[in-house]
Image (cartoon, grey):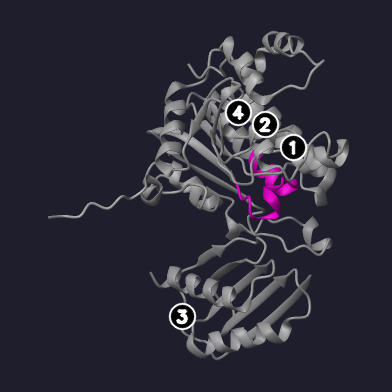
């Protein structure tokens, strides 16, 4: 198991809603997205698969190139692939932007 | 002229099995009445899983929702089968017990509150060993208290099924609803094969497994009350029916003498066959009060 943290201080747009999507099942993950309590966005990942920090970094760099919300994103991961991760993130955005 | 196309009914059916644990709970409560207790944002998660390098889940795989069913106060407790096989740990067990106890408190204060258990579980979470076992005892004790006041309805929809200690919780419930896809049993097929050998039970033989553990057999033997299709509407209507029926005159697990006699009557000198057993047991109609 590995814990990974990222900060995206440039993401400053206010987020007002929260979203919970996904399940920590094999090849899947859950996201708890809520308004950030600190400056900018913050990502905190707990994953059961070690050694993929760079991959997670690429995913979130890409995600925050399009999303500028000051969100706190917590992820519990059970081996989701990068494609699944992006789909879950899109799903969480859909919930808060409804 | 219009062309008629054959559309099989399952195409339009809204599947219950395809829903996750939270959506299952929501689907059974009256529109707009559901309120989640100790939800994921409360972050009451297992402290034991991370110590063993397993990622936890923010609700520990147990979703508790209070609301109304057919206008009556009810609590739905749903286990998420995709997280650690729906297993019961310290936290998920405590959530179940607390929800059942609150329903008992309300019921004895004059507001009968039914409980619906959506069980998709392999039983005790092995990583939490004794705490899971203790939780199982508490859950069963809490069901026994609540069922004196209000019905406890177990739904095993599948596809995980309901095994281990939680099969005992199903056993002491007032009513059990199953689909054909669901399985219910104390020991899962893999466990029986591992402990007694492949001659005793071949865990790769799906037909054998469903002939013994499957919903059709369990309902046929009178160990479960309703066999329903995998459809939200059918499961919802069965649950509503049992909520409205209230608690049965006598629970299945109270019929000790009946089951002693049935077991004594089984001829163990030859191999028992599931369909013959079903026939034998369905003769004297026993019901968990399904009425």
The magenta segment is B79-97
Task: Please give left or right for residue A15 compared with residue B250 in the image.
Answer: left
Chain of the residue displaying label 4? B
What residue is rendered at 52% in x and 90% in y? A65
Where on the picture, by quarter, is residue B260? Answer: top right
Quadrant in which the N terminus of chain B appears: bottom left
Residue identifier under label 2: B212
Instruction: Tell me whether the residue at label 3 lies in contact with that at label 2, contact meaning CB atoms closer than 8 angstroms.
Output: no
Q: Is residue A65 above or below residue B248?
A: below
**Residue most toward the left?**
B1
Q: Which mark is residue A14?
A: 3
Q: CA distance from mark 3 to mark 4?
A: 56 Å
Task: Please give left or right for residue B13 compared with residue B165 in the image.
Answer: left
Q: Position of residue B208 (x, y in %)?
A: 69, 36
Closer to the eye: label 2 or 1: 2
Secondary element at image label 2:
helix
Chain of the residue displaying label 2? B
Q: Position of residue B42 (x, y in %)?
A: 61, 58
Instruction: Tell me whether the residue at label 2 lies in contact with that at label 4, contact meaning CB atoms closer than 8 angstroms.
Output: yes
Closer to the eye: label 1 or 4: 4
Residue identifier under label 4: B217
Q: CA distance from mark 2 to mark 4?
A: 6 Å
Secondary element at image label 4:
helix
What residue is rendered at 78% in x and 80% in y? A51
Where on the picture, by quarter, is residue B284? Answer: top right
The answer to which of B248 and B196 lies nearer the viewer is B196
Secondary element at image label 3:
loop
Q: Which mark is residue B164?
A: 1
Label 1 and label 4 in one chain: yes
Classed neighbour count for the residue bearing mark 1: other residues with Cα under 10 Å, few (<14), some (14–19), many (≥20)? some
Q: Position of residue B120 (x, y in %)?
A: 63, 44
Q: Is residue A18 above or below residue B190?
A: below
């Amino acid at each position: 198991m590995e814990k990974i943290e990222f900060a995206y201080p440039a993401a400053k747009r206010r987020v007002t809603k929260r979203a919970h999507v996904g399940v920590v099942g094999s090849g899947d993950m859950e996201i708890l997205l809520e308004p950030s309590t600190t400056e900018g966005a913050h990502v905190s990942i707990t994953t059961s698969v070690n050694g993929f920090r760079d991959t997670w970094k690429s995913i979130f760099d890409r995600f925050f190139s399009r999303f500028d919300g000051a969100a706190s994103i917590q992820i519990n991961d059970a081996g989701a692939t990068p494609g699944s991760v992006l789909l879950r993130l899109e799903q969480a955005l859909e919930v808060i932007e409804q | 002229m219009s062309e008629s196309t054959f559309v099989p009914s399952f195409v339009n059916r809204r599947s219950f099995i395809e829903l996750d644990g939270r959506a299952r709970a929501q689907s059974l409560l009256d529109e707009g009445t559901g309120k989640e207790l100790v939800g994921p944002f409360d972050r009451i998660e297992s402290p034991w899983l991370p110590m063993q390098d397993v990622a936890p889940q923010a609700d520990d795989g147990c979703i508790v929702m209070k609301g109304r069913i057919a206008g009556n106060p009810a609590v739905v407790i749903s286990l998420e089968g995709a997280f650690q096989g729906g297993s019961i740990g310290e936290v998920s067990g405590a959530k179940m017990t607390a929800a059942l106890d609150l329903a008992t408190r309300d019921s004895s204060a004059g507001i009968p509150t039914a409980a619906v258990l959506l069980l998709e579980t392999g039983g005790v979470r092995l990583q939490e060993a004794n705490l899971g076992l203790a939780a199982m005892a508490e859950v069963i004790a809490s069901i026994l208290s609540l069922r004196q006041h209000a019905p406890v309805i177990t739904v095993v929809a599948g596809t995980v099924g309901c095994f281990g200690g939680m099969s005992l919780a199903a056993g002491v419930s007032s009513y059990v609803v199953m689909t054909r896809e669901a399985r219910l049993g104390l020991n899962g097929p893999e466990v029986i094969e591992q402990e007694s050998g492949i001659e005793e039970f071949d865990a790769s033989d799906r037909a054998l497994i469903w002939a013994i553990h499957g919903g059709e057999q369990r309902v046929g033997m009178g160990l479960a009350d309703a066999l329903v299709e995998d459809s939200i509407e059918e499961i919802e209507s069965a649950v509503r029916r049992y909520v409205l029926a209230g608690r049965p005159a006598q629970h299945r697990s109270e019929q000790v003498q009946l089951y002693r006699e049935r077991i004594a009557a089984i001829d163990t000198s030859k191999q028992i066959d599931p369909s013959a057993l079903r026939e034998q047991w369905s003769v004297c109609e026993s019901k968990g009060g399904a009425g």
